[in-house]
Amino acid sequence: MARHPVTDRAAFLTRRQHRALRVVALAALVLVWEAIARAGWVPVLFLPSPVGVLAEAAEMLRSGELLVHLAASLSRLLLGFAIGAALGVVVGVAVGFFAVAEAVGTPVIAATFPIPKIALLPLLILWLGLGEPSKIAVIALGVFFPMAINTFTGVRQADPLLVRAAVAFGARRWSIIRKVVLPSSLPMIFAGLRLGAGTALLLLVAAEMIAVESGIGFLVLHAGNLMQTTKLMVGIVVLSLLGVASHWSLGRLERLAIPWRAA
Amino acid sequence: MVRRIALVLILALMVSAPPTSAQDRPRVGILKLTSSAPIFVGVEKGFFKEFGVEPELVYFQAAAPIATALAAGQLDVAATGLTAATYNIVLGGETLWIVADKGREWPDHRLTAIVVHKDLHDAGVRSVADLRGKRIAVTQLGSTFHYQIGNILEKEGMSLKDVSIVPLQAMPAALEALKGKQVDAVILPQPFPGRAEADGFGRIIAWGGDLFPWQIATVFYSKKFAADRPRALNFMKGYVKSSRHYHDAVLSGRAGAAYDEVVAVTARYTGAPVPIIKLGLPYQDRSARLWVEDIGRQIAWWQRHGFIKSTIPLKDIIDTSFVEAAAKALGE
């Protein structure tokens, strides 16, 4: 019998991870940036070099300044995120389960959701004063909406077959909610948490630009006002790292909470 | 046919193109405030034109961006306040030159005031010493107002640590915060203190110039503009002439046609009403000479408080040769 080798003509569709390339690409970018700074093609005042930024960050860590700003920002972020997420889940579940809540809730959410939360900041300051409450409130509002909408969608999407199966096994109402509907809405809830995290970070920086004395957003604005561009870059790098950290930690949390989801 | 249309279009473009000017048009960055009066008057009365210079006025909303634009090469001349940002630009490796006076906080010249809320004033907050523990709004940290309130407090034996400085980024925002009692006091230039008193929610407790005179604003040259000495000198001659006219019309004798003219010109350029302009005409040296040692004091103060990393030798940032040469050329 003749042998006929078979070529996989769909081979071009498989995507390789290219793990090494990812790291190398990032490193190359940083190297190019350093080279540009050293060659003087862009003045160092306008584009600080990576080495300069690292040195400044080290100095700020040593003096404790960076930790003060980080602590202030993290406390606002975590508090606002927790409040917004908790309220969002509660409202989302209520609107998902109770027809009355849905009739009242969905128009209100639809009307208020498109308002850019940054635009609400001056109003919140008027209502809650210039202190911490207004900052935490704006972050909480920003997180609330994706959480409420995603939770509501997750609850509504619970597979009816699974619910009927639970009923068939004798589950009562509260058991169904706790053991079928809520767990099956967890993926949507976590998607909402991811969206909320991004929004929270954005609103944190905006909120810290008015009447605060510490925080990463404050650092960025303050350094910009003073033309301390290296410090400004440190602030931006820290914000980027905060974003990466929140993304990663939510990923781990998701794997813990939803072990049945395919990796 | 197509060729004919093309010819007509090309001719039209040629005719509509602006004629190249033999005049030198340096770009001058300023704020639309009363304190820019000498420059407005100089442009209006042709003092710059006499020396072959036609300044192109570029307006900004705040002082710090003007210094940045100058360092970036987008402006030839800047005429604005001295902030910590200015010094950080120089420390960051960019060159700019402080060349002439453009306004000082001076006794009996009402430019910047500390205003408290009326209720606090009624409750007994009447002097700087009473500001201990209060919230004071400024525009930005590192601004001229920040420097001023810091030094005023230190003169009273206090320091910035004894109060809470609240940066609100914009002057109207600071005034609104005072009105809404979200801060206890503000430090702002005219016309805001006047407006606070007129509207009834504020009381002026002190004028900056009476408590702490200093070189608040100067004229800067970009590295490139300063290197072109003839051009730079011509501009300075026009500026010194404008400064002398402003001084004689406004600062020495108050009444008269010249004073009214300066006020009218400034009102037109800034868009503010005449009574408001009259409130905030600042002091500057007749021949626009700099108060050099005060600039050294400022650098030391900012450094002491950690807003700039190291001091700057004055010779690396100040160049008085232009103003001296111009004053000499115009005769004393």
Image (cartoon, coloured by chain):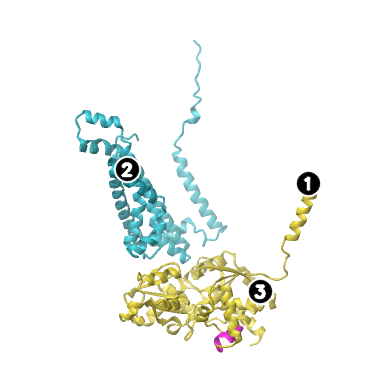
Chain colours: A cyan, B yellow
Q: Earlier in the sequence, mark 1 or mark 3?
A: 1
- Residue A39, image x, y percentages: 56, 57
Q: Which residue has dot 1 on it?
A: B2
Return the chain for callout 2: A
Q: Main secondary structure of the magenta part?
A: helix
Residue B247 lies in magenta, yes or no? yes
Residue A262's place in the image compared with A227, above or below, is above
Does any portion of residue A249 appear in the rendered image?
no
Asked whether the viewer can see residue B191, the reply is: yes
Q: Which residues are magenta?
A: B245-253
Residue type at mark 1?
Val
Q: Is residue B189 left or right of residue B11?
A: left
Q: Nearer the viewer, mark 3 or mark 2?
A: 2
- Secondary element under disc 3, as helix, strand or loop, is helix
Of residues A230 and A116, the one drawn nearer to the viewer in this rendering: A116
Q: Around disc 3, counting alpha carbons within 10 Å, would you say few (fewer than 14), some (14 to 19), or many (20 or more)?
A: few
Pointer 1 local density, CA inside 10 Å: few below 14, some 14–19, many at least 20? few
Q: Image quarter for residue B179?
A: bottom left
Residue sitting at the far top: A1
Asked whether, in this view, residue B107 is left or right of residue B49, the answer is left
Q: Where does residue A150 sit, x and y in percent of width and height? A: 35, 43
The chain under label 1 reads B
Mark-to-mark CA distance, 1 and 3 = 51 Å
Q: Position of residue A4 (x, y in %)?
A: 51, 16
Q: Type of residue at label 2? A: Thr
